[in-house]
Amino acid sequence: MIKAIFFDIDGTILSHRIKEVPMSTRRALSRLSEIHIDRVIATGRHSTEIDILPVSNIAFDAYITLNGQLCYDAKGDVFYENPLQETKEILKLFHSNIVPIMLVEKKRMYINFINDDVVQAHKAISTPLPVVMEYTGNTIYQAIFYVKQAEQSKITEHLKNVEITRWNDSAIDIVAKGGSKVTGIEKYLYIKGYTKEESAAFGDGENDMEMLKYVGKGIAMGNASDFVKSVADYVTSDIDNDGVEKGLNKLGLF
């Protein structure tokens, strides 16, 4: 029996075509609450971004943010955090201005400079451009490099003990080695006393692949790439074609 379901945001519950959570998705999430199945966000986004997105008026049971590096319960209390440990090379690149780099702290996000890659990536996820700032000296939980695939290895070759996942043609997430959405999912399941077989997940991006493989049932959205779909237990419809609702039907939940 499924007791918890983890949902990516972008392209999974938030449609960037209509810039809203589809009504069928809202309806499905409401029904999950009625049958007492935990609804948990699992995203690469920061809490300040979630607060200004159309998902902010949906009450979830927990929030796994920054690809598992900062995890909050429904009250906003942190139940797990995993900051970047080796930031020397990242800060060196940040100060060099070779590529745009956004640093993500617990309370804020900021970037060294903005170019067309940054504009394109943020437009794709309906998010305002970050503020340009100098490094504050605070703890860093995640870095985002705005770099194309062809240039990635040259820019990131000296980074050690990190995990790198691409979420846009022009952008990659960088978190601590071993860190991923699965890390946060494991912590949540442990706290709740659920097994991974009692969990499911919906996602559409490369940074969702590990969690789709980890949970009891992983559902890839119809708008996901074939690469992402290849690791899922089920493939549902596109987000704009009632994908979440149809995926939950596949699970036999209603």
Image: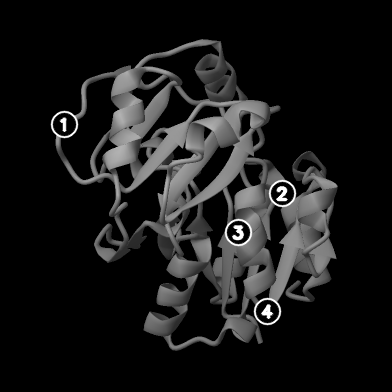
Q: Which mark is residue 29?
A: 3
Q: What is the secondary structure assignment of the residue under circle 2?
A: helix
Q: Which mark is residue 24?
A: 2
Q: Quadrant of residue 231?
A: bottom right
In the picture as drawn, the residue positioned furthest to the left comes out as 137
User: Please, is residue 75 above or below residue 65 in the view?
Assistant: below
> Residue 91, position in %: x, y?
29, 33
Q: Residue at x 40, y 36 (%)?
A: 49
User: In x, y percent, where is residue 201?
Assistant: 64, 65
Look at discs 1 and 3 and give the one toward the viewer: 1
Q: Specify the amino acid type for callout 1.
A: Thr
Is disc 1 in contact with disc 3, using a CB cutoff of under 8 Å? no
As measured in the structure, the alpha-carbon distance from the residue carrying label 4 to the one carrying label 3 is 19 Å
- Describe residue 246's horizontal placement relative to residue 16 as left or right: right
Question: Which residue is pictured at 54% across the width and 37% down the height?
Answer: 172
Task: Answer few, some or many: residues within 10 Å of disc 2's Cα (few below 14, many 20 plus, some between 14 and 19).
Answer: some
Front residue (pair 202, 179): 179
Q: Which residue is mark 4?
A: 216
Distance between the Cα atoms at labels 1 and 4?
Answer: 41 Å
